[in-house]
Amino acid sequence: MQTKYLEIIKDIKAQLTKGILTTGSKLPSVRQLSQQFSCSKNTVLRAYNELEKEHIIFSVPKSGYYVVHQATQPSAPQQIIDFLSAGPDKRIMPYIEFQHCMNQAIDIYKEELFSYNDQQGLYALRVQLAKYLQNLQVFTSPERLFIVSGSQQALHLLASMPFPNGKHNILVEQPTYFGFIEAVRLQQVTTLGIDLTMEGIDLEQLEYIFRNNDIKFFYIVPRFQNPLGHSYTNEEKKRIVELAEKYDVYIVEDDFLGDLDPNMKADPLFSFNPSGRVIYIKSFSKVFLPGLRVGAVVLPALMIHDFSRYKFSADFNSSVLSQGALDIYLKSGMFDSHIKTIKELYSRKMNALQTACEALLPNHIHFTKPTSGFYLSIMLPDHISAKQVVHLLHEKNIWMDDASRMFLPAYQQDHLIRLSISQVEEHLIEEGINELAYCLSLLERNKSRYKNMRPLL
């Protein structure tokens, strides 16, 4: 009888492993088990006591014994293939280097860091940014630069403030960056859209909208647009600026991924009218440290006063500690080195993604082909829902974006999937696209099956 209690323990653990008993299950009574195993009640109690010591079961006075947890081995964390996240790749962020810059900033900018500072931003940083922006063909002075708490703050302020042209409506590409759509929606600003594809926009339609719709400014992402990954040619950018000048429309140029452009001859819209028709926004959130919350805006001189007032009402000035550290990081040359590293990484990832899409997706499924950047979009047939695809893949721990939030209500659709390569691990790209292709094939087969079913009489 000495081994009977071990048989009972083994049997209960086996039931837990097979799922017959699960967390919270009530175990048989002592009397029932003593009859089942032809043993004394004390033998059953000994088995239960041993299981309690292992924290597998617990007793409730006057009620019985219950399962604490299943006696299965803990499974390894499930692998996630992340095509959703759009922040920079965490594995190559220069945390240690920037920490040194922050420590130096505290030593160098003691008084500036811990007191109120220039509303336009730390002057030393504006000088460095003016120098750095020359690499992007943006030639301006520190006096026209404004430091903001990330590009999102700049967009929010520009959407809300009056412009010198006295106009009221805003034009955006469709689809476009969801953060700006949310900003204009919350501020209830009348916002119009213009269709964007990888072939660009219809410039005749753009002229018609500029001429007839009281457009305050046109919000445009000229390079590696979110979500399509589209980039305009220099000729298109020049023509857009000419139309804006002709119809007294301002342009808000969000060049958030301009650092990644492999085409050294590609110019920003700003370069075609540096005097003040184009407002240029530079973000560090996608190519550097998102938590830094530092962005820059190049404004026309006649808008600086109003922008300063709106900025003051929001937060007076942006984090001076972040500004001081970024100033030192730029001066050291480390930022240039970092940009070189990430350009190579993201270009390699984008090539891997396009190669996988070309090889694995069905021929009738079209996808965009950006030269670099973060984003690639896949256009689905009308009968396949992007939300459904994203949901099915999420159950397999493959994360994608259905892009619905990137459309104005009048342009809403459910046939676009956005992929971001910024945080997905390079060796998992092909596996993720293979699962997407399999998911699409299943949905296609289901459609064919239902289409061929005869209705019941």
Image (tube, rainbow, N blue to C red):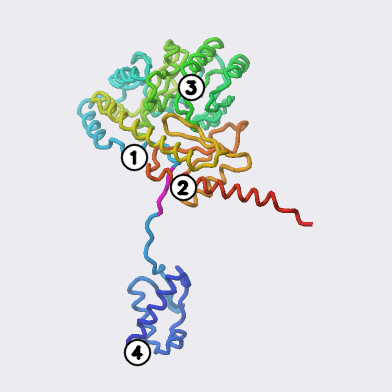
- The residue where tag 2 is placed is 398
* Disc sitting over residue 232 in the figure: 3
Report crowding for label 3: few under 14, some 14 to 19, many 20 or more residues within 10 A (C-alpha): many
Q: Looking at the image, is 165 positioned above or below residue 76? A: above
Q: Residue at x 63, y 16 (%)?
A: 212
Foreground mark, 2 or 4, reads 2
**90, 456: nearer the viewer:** 456
Measured from the top left, where is residue 80 in percent x and y?
42, 49
For the residues labelled 1 and 4, say whether their Cβ atoms are less than 8 Å apart: no
Mark closer to the chain start, 1 or 3: 1
Quadrant (top left/top right/bottom left/bottom right) for the C terminus: bottom right
* Disc sitting over residue 1 in the figure: 4
Foreground mark, 1 or 3, reads 3
Tell whether position 81 is magenta.
yes
Tag 1: amino acid: Lys
- The residue where tag 1 is placed is 90
Mark closer to the chain start, 3 or 4: 4
Quadrant (top left/top right/bottom left/bottom right) for the N terminus: bottom left
Tag 4: amino acid: Met
- Cα–Cα span, label 2 and label 4: 53 Å
335 left or right, relative to 72: left
Q: In the rendered structure, which segment of residues is drawn in magenta? A: 78-82
| Residue 200 appears in the figure | yes
Tell whether position 178 is magenta.
no
Tag 3: amino acid: Tyr
Mark closer to the chain start, 1 or 2: 1
- Cα–Cα span, label 1 and label 3: 29 Å
Tell me the SS state at disc 3. Answer: loop
What is the magenta segment's predominant secondary structure? loop
- Cα–Cα span, label 1 and label 2: 18 Å
